[in-house]
Amino acid sequence: MTRTTVTKRAATGALTGLALGDALGFPTEFNDVPAILAKCGPWREMELPRPAIVTDDTQMTLALGKGLRAATDRGVLAPETMTEPVRREFVAWNRSPENNRAPGHTCLTACDLLEREDRPWQDASQIHSKGCGANMRVAPVGLVPGLSDEQRAGAAQLQSALTHGHPTALAASDLTAHAVRLLAEGAEPTGLVGLLRSYAYDNRTRYHERWLGDLWTRAQDPSPEHFIARGWDDCLAILDRLQDALRTVSPETDPCLATGEGWIAEEAMATGLLCFLLFVDEPLTALRRGACTSGDSDSVACLAGAFAGAHLGADAWPAAWADRIEYRGDLVSLGALWDA
């Protein structure tokens, strides 16, 4: 971890930004842009709701974060130490009375199946789902200090695979965690898309068998390399669209028109990145742009917030917003642990 990462408190910034974007986008999800403007007024002036309630995006981010904390408390992060604590946290989230924020069908179905401890977790994975539920929650993997590239990639894909087993969900989760890590470590946003493209090409046929086991056999692919390449190809295609959008899109235009509505993993990643990259030095504007979209507004805005917070750190968010976000104590506790 670099000195810069510690000084700016990137983990606290990313987790806080994620929750703020989630809360800002919660009331606008399922609305089109004209309806949002009628409800909220000019998008650049959107205010954090009172109370600042989050969705399953933040709840599952915290579940993953707590699972990772338990796993790293045992020693080196590995599939053997990670799978059970994360599985346990996901099942606890599924059973919680606070799980009443319109959670995704894939997460609910998979978490019900994860309770059956007599079967391998791969049997619970929804192999044909690439919904955004896998990468909306993955930011903690990019924030845990001291991981190797192999650990980070494997952990990002494993946490996805517990619920969303589609190769694009795995690749998009890996790419999202990698982007968070790059920004936390001080990568220049202007070069971020190029770095992500290189990473995708380098990993295009790399199947992390140690972390995923025989997951690939649940699909119809002839080999694990063919299976995972399908996911990376989807991500490379959306990164091309993102690169074009950064050159051509007006900040006043709904970002979903350029990079997708965000209901699926690669589009959520790209549209969240687009909102961040359009307003690199204006983090609240990035959140507002994400929340005022025609697609999955809370997930798009939460990813934009994670990227902005990783880049700018905890001081990016005004106390008048950060101090009243739901689950503030849990977010700060995890952030402080990883910033220390």
Image (cartoon, rainbow, N blue to C red):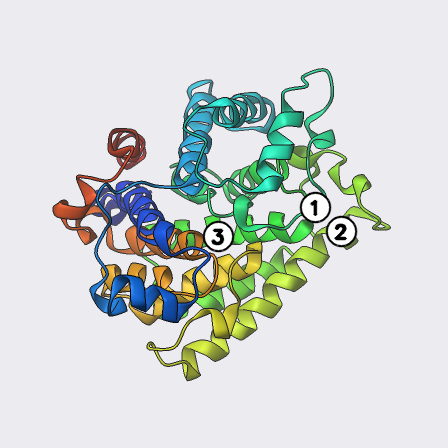
| Residue drawn at 58 percent across, 56 percent down | 264
The image quadrant that residue 46 belongs to is bottom left
Q: In the rendered view, would you say 192 is above or below 4?
A: below
Query: What residue sits right under mark 1 in the picture?
Result: 207
Q: Are marks 1 and 3 in contact (CB under 8 Å)?
A: no
Which residue is at the front of the view, 338 or 327? 327
Q: Mark 1 and mark 2: span between their CA atoms?
A: 8 Å
Q: Position of residue 56 (x, y in %)?
A: 44, 39
Q: Secondary structure at mark 1?
A: loop
- The disc at residue 238 is none
Three-letter amino acid code at disc 2? Phe
| Residue drawn at 70 percent across, 46 percent down | 207
| Viewer-nearest of discs 1 and 2 | 2
Q: From the viewer's perspective, is 73 left or right of 50?
A: right
Could you tell me which quadrant the N terminus lies in?
Answer: top left
Q: Mark 2 and mark 3: span between their CA atoms?
A: 19 Å
Q: Mark 1 and mark 3: span between their CA atoms?
A: 17 Å
Mark 1 or 2, nearer chain start? 1
Query: What residue sits right under mark 3 in the picture?
Result: 176
Q: Are marks 1 and 2 in contact (CB under 8 Å)?
A: yes
